[in-house]
Image (cartoon, rainbow, N blue to C red):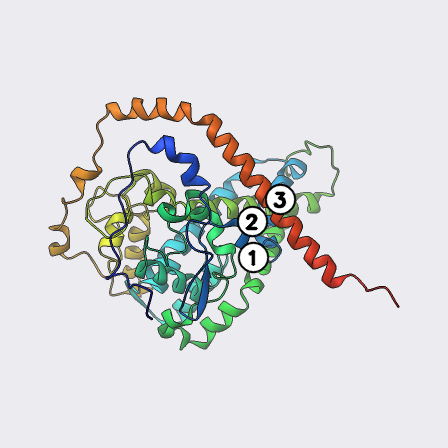
Amino acid sequence: MSGVKSASESTPAPAVKTGFWKTLPGKIFASAASPSTMAVTDGIAQKAGGSYKSVEWIRNAPFFFMHAACLGAIWVGFSWAAAALALGFYVVRMFFITGFYHRYFSHRTFRASRPVQCLMAVCGLTCVQRGPLWWAAHHRHHHVHSDHEEDLHSPTLWGLLWSHMFWFTTEDALPTRSRYVRDLEKFPELVWLNKYEMAVYIAFGCACFGLGCLMHALGWQPAGHPMGLELGGYWHAGLQILVWAFFISTVMLYHGTYTINSLSHIFGSRRFETTDTSRNNWLLSIVTMGEGWHNNHHHYQSSVRQGFYWYEWDPTFYTLKAMSWVGLVKDLRGVPDAIRKQAGRGVAAAAKPVKAVTETMSEAASTVTEAANSVGEAASQVADQVADQVAQVVEKVAPKPAL
């Protein structure tokens, strides 16, 4: 479409500027950096990225409720069994996102039978990150426009906080961009799961509650009630596992996954020159089971492994490799030697002397007040928008006085 550049025609995204800590508040709370409306692309009118005025607060109430529900731990208490389940479900479901939603549905870096594919979709839905078609479509769109104006979650354009957790709360991001997933839409079961995603969310939440009840029936006694709330044995056990294994574990999973959209375009090294700001970050690779090698991935998206070398931690690839040994998946696509030989051009630019660490720490200290002020302004803006949307809803549903 005229007026909208393709990824190949767009100018490369600018490198991250020096003096990062001095500009950190602006990077976190950037807003309305683009015009109020952009060209219509993919059949969807894109509003300004980074503008909290475009957040659909009411429609995204379930997402914010997931966070609020974590406070339930105050009443249901803590136990090592509940914490272990929360961590275990985090690890297992992170693999569902990285191995299935990302490396299979989004990039098709290996093959699987139709029953396994359907099972992958159901497992991915337990992560409560929308349906497989929605997830794959937006991710493919991101790779086409990475760190350019059409990219809905570019931290260099719209701010770190926006790219981390607010980009998908707008009207622009709610639909599935069908043009990017025609290959997946030919499977009716995937289309159904994508449409009725809520059914899996509810079923998984109920399963967590039921697991707590089963554990109690087998003799497990949950911890006491820190707020003095007295519940029956089964209710206490079920609610404790529900809060920790479902709500807390899922919110942890949210923000672990989101770091790849936000932090991996800000912090880390660049082995390859790309037209975006993607970076490799070993710490994020631990958090996300191998997704932190983001610069590798943006340079060559067709590989099932994102850690291109043996010393780059990538447990998602190790798990998929093990699954291939028993026939669950097959035809895993590797990294050609020619791709590895292209490394090096971006390393010098990304390397930072050790003494820069102390310098940036002093810069960070000088921006604490500025960041606090930015937080206050953002909170005020959010409160105003929520109040406006609530008032609009009340006005629509309130009965009109009889004449």
Q: Are marks 2 and 1 in contact (CB under 8 Å)?
A: yes
Give the number of the disc on residue 246. 2
Measured in 3D between alpha carbons, the distance from the residue under mark 2 to the one under mark 1, in whole angstroms, is 8 Å
User: Circles 2 and 3: CB distance less than 8 Å?
Assistant: no
- Image: 333 above or below 318: below
Residue at image coords 61%, 53% = 61
Rendered location of residue 258, percent (x, y): 42, 48
Q: Residue at x 47, y 60 (%)?
A: 173
Quadrant of the rendered image containing residue 241: top right
Q: Which residue is mark 1?
A: 204
Q: Position of residue 189 (x, y in %)?
A: 47, 74
Side of 86 where 102 appears, left or right: left
Label 1 sits on what residue type?
Phe
Dot 2 or dot 1, earlier in sequence = 1
Report the side of 119 relative to 104 (left or right).
right
Q: Answer few, some or many: residues within 10 Å of disc 3's Cα (few below 14, many 20 plus, some between 14 and 19).
A: few
Of the residues shown, which amino acid type is indicated by label 2? Phe
Label 1: element kind: helix
Q: Which mark is residue 383?
A: 3
Residue 5 point in image, percent of width and height: 30, 63
